[in-house]
């Protein structure tokens, strides 16, 4: 056992241990006393005893109460840092003592690491051990004895894992990785084989070493440490894989787990680094583990091969992960694609590593390696083409296991799926215009490895096994080829290609080349016809593979097959016998024969040479006979389905069924399925045979006759059709042939009795099936009579009475099926029969035969018994009989139930169908269930549901549903006088229609509705009938509700003829004064066209009062109700005068009143009353007609009596209120009449809700003039009713608020009285009641100084409500949000809250809603205007900083919540700096400070600077512990600098904030920089502190500091505008320069050269501070300095070569411009992209523009952009340069005047590639408007620059491909700025408006206009000018409705500068008015002005109409 092994050394020393002293360590004193013993032997014994006492077993958990832990803690408290041990260690050199000391330290650190509180005791020990002195000692032991090596590595592992790896970085830096002995250590294993668990319990030297290496990449290690370790010690890490194949299973598992979890699963470690580690060599070491495929433990689960297999599957088979790149499938590698993580090797594929791995896999020897290879090829299909020549599989046919394995693997590779996804354009669902290369396609299907020769030789081999394997491989190739062809066809159809299309041509090329690589067709034919003397299974296998090849050849190479002489009809021979022998076969042979049949049938489908009329060899029968026999005999569903499809395809093309292709299914469904055994006889002795034989022979004969003389039978069919009935759909002429031959053969006794019965049953089923197709049954009844005449008893078999009776019974069933539609459905009541009962009892006792064929025969014998004996059965007899049949053969139930006579109606109760199982319903059909149902069954809802379930059990086709519906329609037609039965049938029809319309496609659903409603005579008659009973009327109404949609234009058009019929009847009834069909008319008016309804209204208006009877008025009002939904589009057809005439007739009609209200408001501007529309979508098309135009209104002709009649109404509806309100706005006289009526007191009887809108309209339209007209008593009473008293709807509450504010502000005489009323009303209400009214009124009256006291009281009520609201649970409803919005608005307008109101509010916000942005916004606004005591401010600050969620809410991620919290804190700090600036307040802020340029971090930095200014104390001591990452502990400023993100620092160099200043002035916040950019001011100060207090001491520390890129940023700071920042940076760089001179780092000379170049560039100014360095100079030096310490970066050799080639840097030149822009190296594209980005980053000021202008840089870039149309990355980079150029005024003016910038932009935006950069172009255009000297441009171009600008803007909008709100927002702002420029062309600007409004109309359906409460305030878009940084990033739209409103306002304001209206000005104005209605008066002052003007123009327009 492991324990005995670990104790073995002690046992060897057992004789000496008896002399040793027994040590007991109870406390620290005992430990120290024992260790202080001067006797060396005693000291060793004490150390050994102490180590034993403190040792911790592997995997042991140390409890907090552990005695060992307590002893160590007490010891460390007495001897900090284990000073006792280090003293002993320093004074001894004995190997035994050293191993004890090192092992003891490992145990101590393991105990202290177990719990966080004790880490502080272990840190000093680790600091000592990691010091250079002690680290040298430890590493020297690695060269010593094995025991010292073991304990040293154990100690290093303990240090690395201490505290979760907190000192791992320090350990990595301190450990000497260049030791030569490490290579030896990596191979030192323990000799002998121990238990598997012993490896982890007692690791050997190599295991400890491997674990030590792995600790630097485990999941607990930071990504920065991992990256540094792997970059610098790559070989050390890779060394662990060299001997991994010899390690134990547990070690291997540990290594692979850490590599996956710690390395591959860490996204922060560069993927290129990971791929470099796991290259071919490393994978090769891992592949050796496949050799260990045997379990290495007793349980059998430790298999190393499984471990490595799953690891390799994870990293090799998932595209985009591991070493598997996402390539382009069959397309070659796009060398122009800019992929971030692509491997750096060249070539045509990405996955070169996997390609090399595939070569080394032993796919034929190991199933795991074969699986790996297959999955790699599936993930990387591009590797298949190159795999075959590289791997060299032996494919030459030979009978050997290796060849069989090779050919099998070949087939598996070929059969991988087609990479269809690679056919699509990346990132899109559009197919590539170009197909993949031909060679790649072919190599993935039929590789060019002599494949044709090998396949041909294999098929002709003498070995059957070789033939079979070859056939399978070839079949896989052809199957893959067919899939490729199918994929190509999909692409061709999607791209709508013709014969000249690229995909079509490639399709033909692939087919042509594939023909050359496959064996000749004759070889395959010979293989299929080969005579084989072998066993049955072998024959079946070879036969199946041969038939499969023949089918695939027909499928893939139809031309090759056509060229060969091969009769496909011969393949049918033998298939009938095979299908009949299927039941006798066992095993898999049966299935193989089924597959053969399937292949042959599919072959026949693909062959154009096969015709059903061909003759079978040595037989008079055609192929049709063979196919029918197979169809009847085969039990395989796949064969039956394919055979039916084949028969339908071949027969539909013949003259027999070419006019009726759907009829083929009915003939096939009618075929018999009865199966009889040999020697079967009828009760009368007649021999019985399988019915399928006789019917197939008979149909074959009939088909041959019909196809020979088709016109003869067509004429016979025409003669038989009833000429007077056009509803008859003529069937196939084959039916006449069947009738003729049936009669002739019966008369001539040419049929056996069995065949005669089979044919009669077939004809019976066929005629019944045809009933589902015929709209009229007259023709089928004639056919039925013909069959009856042919099967008269004298023509039958008198010697066989049973057969004759059975034939007559079939005829009787057929007659009954057609008479069932006429006769009353009643169930017969048969008498019981004892003989039947005895027979059923007997058969129930028959045992179940073992043979399946015997069971089938027994089942059909019972069916024959039912047909021949014709017993008298009762329902319970049918139940028993069905149970026996189901026991024998369930499918026979279908025949059993179909042979029940419909006259007995036994099927439902006999089959117990009401509770039928799903299995039973699967064998039944809806047709016979319906035919066997009685009237009671139809009336039973459960029975109808069962029939519905049977119909839809398998998804039916439209034809099948039409068949079922047609049967029901026939039944309805025959029993029209039976009211209840008709209702039940209509209910069944409704259920079928509802289910069918839900499952069918839209097109099939429309065809089904047309078939039922228009072509079914019974339904059409019901629709046109006017005297239907009420129940039938209701059932018909339910059917129409399910079938038709009144809002669907297609449905209305379909039934337009019926609707027209009823509208004409109604108009006739108006003229006659008699209406008897009111209900039917109302039923169909729902689907009538609006124009027909308008005609009805017109005629009703012109009719006399006598003609308008009550019934007519009822229908008329219903028509108005239907018309109301489309009234907005029909209003122009109904003058208001006509509506008023109807109003006299229908004075109480609410519908008519609502229509009048719509007509009144339609003549007014939208939202004329300022109320919100409150709808989800707005109809702007209808509002266009509402815009006021002179002389267009109808409201001026309203009669006076109509208005007075409205005032006389005792009850007002909402429509009444809308009419009065609209008339008040339309006619000023109506307002005066309303006031007079109101003063009279008549309004007291009208409820307040409908009265209020009219009052608001009067106050809103007349203002103060209206108030003077009101009497005092009326005004006071009105005001009192408006005050908050009880809950009202939201819209009414807002109206009350507006009216109260209007009255309070406008009524000067009653102002104080009204204010007192409002104040008293509010005082008697609780604070939480009507808070919305309080804050809304206060917000509106806040600017009205005479009511300041009232406003203060109302706001204080709102603040009290806010305290209660924020104290409650989170979550607000709509009202709460409105209150908070108003409170925010009041606070931001400077409301001064009293301290006793503000203090509890702040406390509540801090405690409960610190994460609520709205609450924080309110708090910040109130703090800026309200005084607070210092103690209150301090308490608030402490509450925030001590909040449990403070650090979580203020995390490192920039967010609006974090920004608001920090603004809140900053506002508190500024209130009383003397009290707030305390260290306890500053220290917590350090944890959330990120050092970035974001607004929140700048606010924090200002707080820190405020602290320094107030306390006159530097903050450096507090900043000493600042960490750039919250999870990393920092010990000094040096650690902070080294841990800063180098990528973020480099980004700061690129987008350097040139505007940053050292002073406390407010800085420009226009530049949209975020937390991804460091603050250069803070970085400068931090570096200064670092150089003063903790400068780098070693070369490694200097390198680490340089790699953080802080010194590159200091160089960039020399280009800052602020001279103080330049001066500070220069001083720090000089200090760094001196320090580097004294260092011994390897990069010293490179860095000094760059610093020397920099020194020569610095020129002092007159005041001593350095002059600003041009941005290009500082930027190139920054890149060069970074490249020195990142030599792997591609730019390093280029910058180094550039700087070394010249003695000094020319600051007036652009560095490396021509060399990089027009480079010819392999990396020319990277160079070009880099220099373009360099130019963009360097263009920051006018001086930089002068440098660019000197070298004509813009001309170079513009020409390059014109020549690189398809290079999207380059185009975007140049646009970023242009954005930075147009941000400078001098550059912009120069480019427009001298470089024709606008003309160049006009050309560029017309290119298709510019569509994706619409937002960038708009930003650049706005930059031009903002920064250019427009006056100079105007003088120089005489205004033509504006016309060119308009053309550019119009083209940008017209060519925009991805339209969005941000794009339209930007376009609207540009349009507004352009319109405000002087002398803008109206012609060109109108085009801009048309394009912008067109985009707006397309985006509006996606906006929810009902969410008005979400509009909290004006949007804050980013301010121009726009720089290159973030130019192409589309900003998010948090509030689409607010964005829409801003767009409308900008466009409307811009349109007002035009001299005349453009086409869509009315549409734009209507949107502005509706926006005003959504946000209110304060939300859109511009919209309010437009509303007032629109109403004024509307009133004047109406006045002009009156005049």
Image (cartoon, rainbow, N blue to C red):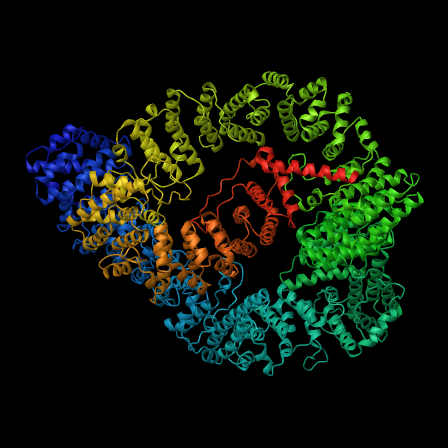
Please tell me how many numbered marks the rendered image carries: 0
Look at the image and tell me in which quarter the C terminus lies.
top right
When the figure is inspected, residue 507 is found, relative to residue 1637, above or below; the finding is below
When the figure is inspected, residue 1556 is found, relative to residue 557, above or below; the finding is above
Q: Position of residue 1216 (x, y in %)?
A: 76, 32
Q: Position of residue 1998 (x, y in %)?
A: 75, 38
Judged left or right of residue 1134, residue 1278 is: left
Tell me, yes or no, if residue 161 can be seen here. no
Q: Position of residue 1452 (x, y in %)?
A: 38, 39
Quadrant in the picture for residue 666: bottom right
When the figure is inspected, residue 1206 is found, relative to residue 10, above or below; the finding is above
What residue lies at 43% left-to-right and 34% top-to-bottom?
1460
Q: Position of residue 1062 (x, y in %)?
A: 85, 49
Q: Foreground: 1086 or 60?
A: 1086
Quadrant in the picture for residue 1517: top left
Q: Residue furthest left?
A: 39
What residue lies at 33% left-to-right and 24% top-to-bottom?
1474
Tell me, yes or no, if residue 641 can be seen here. yes
Q: Foreground: 737 or 578?
A: 737
Q: Foreground: 1504 or 1677?
A: 1677
Q: Foreground: 993 or 1199?
A: 1199
When the figure is inspected, residue 1172 is found, relative to residue 1823, above or below; the finding is above
Judged left or right of residue 1353, residue 770 is: right
Judged left or right of residue 1401, residue 1140 is: right
């Amino acid at each position: 056992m492991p324990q005995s092994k670990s104790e073995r050394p002690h046992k060897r020393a057992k004789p000496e241990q008896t002399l040793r002293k027994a040590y007991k360590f109870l406390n620290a004193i005992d430990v120290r006393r024992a260790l202080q013993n001067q006797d060396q032997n005693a000291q060793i014994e004490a150390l050994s005893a102490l180590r034993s006492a403190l040792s911790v077993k592997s995997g042991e958990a140390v409890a907090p109460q552990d005695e060992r832990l307590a002893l160590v803690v007490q010891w460390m408290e007495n001897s900090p840092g284990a000073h006792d041990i280090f003293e002993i260690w320093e004074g001894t050199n004995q190997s035994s003592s050293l191993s004890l000391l090192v092992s003891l330290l490992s145990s101590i650190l393991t105990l202290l690491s177990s719990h966080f509180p004790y880490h502080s005791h272990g840190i000093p020990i680790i600091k000592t051990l990691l010091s250079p002195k002690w680290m040298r000692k430890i590493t020297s032991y690695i060269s010593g004895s094995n025991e010292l090596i073991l304990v040293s590595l154990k100690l290093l592992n303990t240090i690395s894992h201490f505290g979760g790896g907190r000192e791992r970085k320090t350990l990595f830096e301190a450990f000497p990785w260049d030791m030569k002995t490490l290579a030896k250590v990596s191979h030192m294993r323990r000799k002998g084989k121990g238990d598997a668990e012993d490896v982890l319990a007692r690791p050997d030297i190599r295991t400890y070493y491997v674990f030590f290496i792995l600790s630097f990449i485990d999941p607990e290690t930071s990504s920065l440490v991992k990256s540094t370790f792997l970059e610098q010690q790559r070989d050390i890490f890779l060394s662990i894989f060299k001997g991994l194949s010899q390690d134990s299973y547990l070690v291997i598992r540990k290594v692979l787990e850490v590599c996956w979890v710690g390395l591959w699963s860490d996204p922060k470690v560069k993927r290129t680094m990971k791929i470099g580690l796991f290259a071919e060599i490393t994978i090769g070491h891992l592949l050796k583990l496949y050799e260990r495929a045997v379990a290495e433990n007793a349980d059998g689960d430790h298999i190393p091969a499984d471990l490595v297999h799953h690891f390799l599957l994870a990293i090799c088979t998932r595209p985009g992960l591991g070493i598997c790149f996402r390539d382009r499938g069959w397309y070659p590698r796009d060398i122009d694609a800019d992929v971030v993580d692509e491997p750096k090797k060249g070539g045509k594929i990405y996955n070169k590593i996997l390609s090399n791995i595939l070569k080394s896999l032993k796919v034929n020897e190991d199933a795991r390696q074969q699986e790996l290879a297959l999955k790699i090829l599936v993930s990387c299909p591009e590797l298949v083409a190159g795999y075959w020549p590289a791997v060299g599989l032996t494919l030459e046919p030979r009978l050997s296991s290796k060849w069989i394995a090779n050919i099998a693997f070949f087939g598996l590779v070929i059969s991988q799926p087609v990479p269809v996804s690679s056919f699509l354009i990346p990132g899109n669902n559009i197919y590539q215009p170009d197909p993949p290369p031909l060679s790649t396609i072919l190599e993935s299907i039929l590789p060019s490895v002599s494949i044709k020769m090998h396949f041909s030789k294999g098929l002709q081999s003498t070995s059957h096994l070789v033939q079979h394997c070859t056939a399978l491989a070839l079949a896989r190739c052809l199957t893959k080829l067919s899939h490729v062809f199918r994929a190509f066809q999909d692409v061709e159809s999607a791209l709508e290609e013709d014969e000249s299309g690229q995909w079509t041509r490639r399709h033909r090329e692939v087919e042509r080349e594939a023909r050359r690589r496959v064996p000749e067709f004759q070889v395959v034919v010979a293989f299929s016809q080969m005579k084989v003397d072998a066993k049955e299974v072998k024959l079946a296998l070879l036969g199946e593979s041969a038939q499969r090849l023949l089918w695939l050849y027909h499928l893939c190479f139809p031309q090759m097959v056509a060229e060969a002489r091969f009769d496909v009809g011969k393949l049918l021979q033998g298939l009938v016998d095979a299908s009949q022998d299927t039941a006798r076969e066992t095993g898999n042979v049966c299935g193989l024969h089924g597959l053969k049949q399937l292949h042959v049938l599919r072959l026949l489908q693909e062959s154009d040479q096969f015709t059903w009329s061909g003759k079978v060899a040595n037989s008079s029968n055609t192929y049709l006979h063979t196919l029918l026999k197979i169809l009847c005999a085969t039990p395989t569903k796949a064969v039956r389905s394919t055979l039916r499809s084949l028969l339908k395809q071949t027969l539909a093309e013949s003259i027999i069924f070419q006019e009726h292709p759907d009829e083929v299914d009915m003939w096939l469904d009618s075929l018999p399925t009865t199966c009889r055994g040999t020697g079967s006889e009828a009760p009368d002795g007649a021999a019985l045979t399988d019915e399928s034989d006789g019917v197939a022979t008979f149909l074959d004969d009939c088909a041959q006759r019909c196809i020979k003389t088709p016109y003869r039978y067509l004429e016979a069919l025409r003669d038989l059709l009833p000429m007077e009935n056009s509803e008859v759909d003529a069937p196939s002429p084959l039916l006449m042939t069947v009738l003729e031959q049936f009669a002739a053969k019966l008369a001539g006794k040419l049929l056996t009795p069995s065949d005669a019965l089979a044919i009669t049953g077939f004809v019976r089923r066929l005629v019944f099936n045809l009933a589902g197709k015929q709209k009229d049954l007259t023709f089928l009844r004639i056919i039925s009579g013909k069959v009856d005449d042919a099967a008269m008893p004298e023509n039958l078999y008198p010697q066989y009475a049973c057969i004759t009776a059975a034939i007559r019974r079939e005829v009787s069933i057929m007659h009954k099926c057609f008479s069932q539609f006429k006769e009353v459905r009643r169930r017969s009541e048969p008498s019981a029969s004892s003989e039947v009962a005895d027979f059923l009892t007997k058969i129930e006792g028959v045992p179940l035969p073992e043979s399946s064929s015997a069971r089938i025969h027994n089942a059909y014998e019972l069916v024959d018994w039912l047909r021949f004996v014709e017993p008298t059965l009762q329902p319970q007899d049918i139940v028993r009989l069905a149970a026996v049949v189901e026991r024998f053969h369930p499918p026979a139930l279908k025949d059993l139930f179909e042979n029940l006579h419909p006259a007995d109606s036994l099927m439902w109760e006999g089959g117990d169908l009401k509770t039928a199982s799903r299995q039973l319903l699967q064998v039944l059909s809806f047709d016979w269930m319906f035919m066997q149902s009685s009237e009671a069954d139809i009336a039973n809802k459960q029975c109808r549901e069962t029939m519905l379930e049977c119909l839809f059990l398998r998804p039916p086709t439209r034809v099948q549903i039409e068949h079922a519906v047609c049967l029901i329609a026939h039944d309805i037609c025959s029993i029209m006088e039976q009211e209840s039965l008709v209702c039940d049938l209509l209910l069944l029809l409704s259920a079928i229609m509802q289910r069918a319309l839900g499952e069918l496609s839209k097109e099939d659903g429309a065809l089904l509705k047309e078939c039922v409603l228009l072509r079914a005579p019974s339904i059409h008659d019901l629709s046109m009938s006017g005297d239907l009973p009420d129940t039938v009327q209701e059932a018909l109404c339910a059917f129409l509700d399910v079938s038709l949609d009144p809002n669907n234009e297609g449905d209305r058009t379909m039934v337009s003829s019926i609707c027209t019929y009823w509208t004409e009847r109604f108009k006739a009834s108006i003229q006659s004064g008699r209406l008897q069909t009111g209900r039917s008319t109302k039923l169909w008016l729902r689907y009538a066209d609006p124009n027909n309804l308008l005609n009805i209204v017109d005629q009703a208006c012109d009719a006399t009062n006598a003609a308008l009877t009550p019934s007519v008025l009822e229908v008329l009002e219903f028509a108005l109700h239907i018309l109301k939904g489309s009234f907005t589009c029909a209003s122009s057809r109904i003058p208001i005068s006509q509506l008023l005439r109807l109003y006299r007739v229908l004075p109480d009609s609410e519908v008519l009143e609502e229509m009048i209200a719509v007509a009144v408001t339609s003549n007014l501007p939208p939202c004329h009353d300022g109320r919100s529309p409150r709808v989800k979508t707005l109809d702007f098309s209808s509002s266009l007609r509402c815009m006021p135009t002179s002389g267009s209104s109808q409201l001026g002709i309203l009669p006076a009596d109509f208005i007075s009649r409205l005032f006389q109404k005792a009850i007002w509806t909402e429509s009444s209120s809308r009419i009065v309100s609209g008339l008040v706005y339309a006619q000023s006289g109506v307002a005066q009449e309303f006031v007079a009526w109101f003063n009279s007191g008549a309004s007291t009887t009208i409820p307040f809700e409908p009265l209020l809108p009219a009052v608001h309209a009067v106050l809103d339209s007349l203002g103060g003039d209206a108030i003077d007209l009101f009497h005092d008593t009326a005004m006071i009473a009105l005001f009192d009713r408006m005050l908050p008293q009880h809950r009202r709807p939201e819209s009414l509450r807002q109206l009350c608020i507006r009216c109260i504010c209007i009255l309070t502000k406008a009524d000067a005489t009653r102002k104080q009285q009204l204010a007192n009323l409002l104040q008293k009303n509010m005082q008697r209400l609780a604070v939480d009641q009507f808070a919305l009214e309080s804050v809304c009124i206060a917000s509106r009256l806040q600017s009205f100084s005479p009511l300041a006291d009232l406003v203060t009281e109302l706001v204080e009520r709102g603040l009290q409500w806010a305290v209660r609201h924020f104290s409650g649970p989170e979550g607000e409803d709509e009202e709460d949000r409105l209150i908070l919005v108003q409170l925010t608005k009041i606070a931001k307008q400077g409301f001064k809250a009293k301290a006793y109101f503000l203090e509890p509010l702040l406390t509540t916000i801090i405690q409960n809603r610190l994460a609520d942005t709205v609450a924080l916004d309110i708090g910040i606004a109130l703090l800026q205007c309200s005084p607070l005591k210092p103690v209150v401010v301090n308490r608030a600050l402490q509450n925030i900083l001590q909040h449990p969620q403070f650090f979580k809410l203020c995390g490192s991620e920039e967010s609006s919540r974090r920004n608001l919290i920090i603004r809140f804190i900053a506002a508190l700090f500024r209130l009383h700096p003397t009290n707030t600036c305390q260290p306890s307040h500053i220290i917590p802020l350090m944890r959330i400070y990120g050092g970035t340029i974001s607004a929140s971090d700048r606010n924090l930095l200002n707080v820190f600077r405020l602290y320094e200014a107030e306390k006159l104390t530097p903050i450096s001591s507090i900043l000493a512990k600042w960490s750039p990452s919250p999870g990393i502990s920092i010990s000094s400023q040096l650690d902070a600098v080294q841990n800063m993100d180098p990528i973020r620092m480099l980004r700061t160099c690129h987008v350097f904030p040139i505007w940053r200043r050292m002073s406390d002035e407010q800085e420009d916040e226009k530049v949209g920089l975020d937390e991804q950019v460091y603050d250069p001011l803070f970085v400068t100060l931090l570096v200064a502190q670092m150089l003063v207090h903790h400068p780098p001491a070693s070369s490694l520390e200097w390198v680490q500091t340089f790699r953080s890129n802080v010194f590159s940023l200091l160089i960039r700071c020399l280009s800052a505008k602020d001279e103080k920042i330049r001066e500070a940076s220069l001083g720090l760089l000089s200090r760094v320069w001196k320090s580097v001179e004294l260092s011994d780092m390897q990069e010293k000379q490179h860095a000094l050269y760059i610093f020397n170049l920099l020194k020569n560039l610095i020129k002092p100014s007159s005041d001593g501070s350095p002059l600003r360095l041009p941005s290009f100079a500082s930027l190139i030096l920054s890149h060069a300095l970074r490249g020195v310490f990142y030599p792997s970066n591609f730019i390093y050799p280029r910058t180094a070569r550039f700087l070394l080639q010249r003695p000094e840097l020319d600051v007036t030149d652009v560095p490396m411009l021509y060399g990089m822009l027009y480079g010819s190296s392999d990396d020319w594209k990277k160079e070009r992209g880099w220099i373009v980005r360099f130019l963009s980053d360097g263009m920051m000021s006018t001086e930089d523009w002068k440098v660019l202008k000197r070298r004509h840089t813009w001309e170079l870039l513009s020409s390059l952009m014109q020549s690189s149309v398809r290079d999207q990355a380059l185009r975007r980079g140049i646009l970023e340069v242009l954005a930075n150029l147009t941000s400078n005024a001098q550059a912009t003016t120069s480019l427009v005047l001298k470089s024709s910038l606008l003309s160049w932009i006009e050309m560029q935006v017309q290119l298709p590639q510019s569509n994706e950069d619409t937002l960038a172009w708009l930003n650049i255009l706005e930059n031009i408007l903002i920064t250019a000297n427009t006056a100079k441009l105007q003088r120089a171009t005489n205004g033509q620059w504006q016309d060119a600008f308009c053309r550019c803007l119009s083209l940008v909008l017209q060519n925009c491909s991805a339209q969005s709100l941000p794009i339209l927002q930007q376009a609207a702002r540009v349009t507004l700025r352009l319109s405000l420029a002087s002398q803008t062309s109206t012609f060109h600007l109108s085009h801009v408006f048309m394009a912008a409004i067109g985009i707006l109309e397309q985006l509006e359906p996606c906006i929810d206009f009902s969410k008005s409460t979400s509009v909290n305030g004006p949007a804050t878009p980013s301010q121009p000018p726009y720089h290159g940084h973030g130019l192409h990033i589309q900003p998010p739209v948090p509030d689409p409705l607010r964005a829409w409103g801003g767009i409308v306002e900008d466009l409307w304001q811009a349109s007002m500068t035009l001299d005349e209206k453009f086409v869509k000005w009315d549409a734009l104005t209507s949107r502005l008015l509706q926006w005003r209605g959504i946000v209110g008066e304060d939300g859109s002052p511009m919209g309010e002005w437009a509303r007032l003007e629109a109403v004024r123009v509307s009133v004047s327009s109406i006045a002009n109409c009156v005049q």
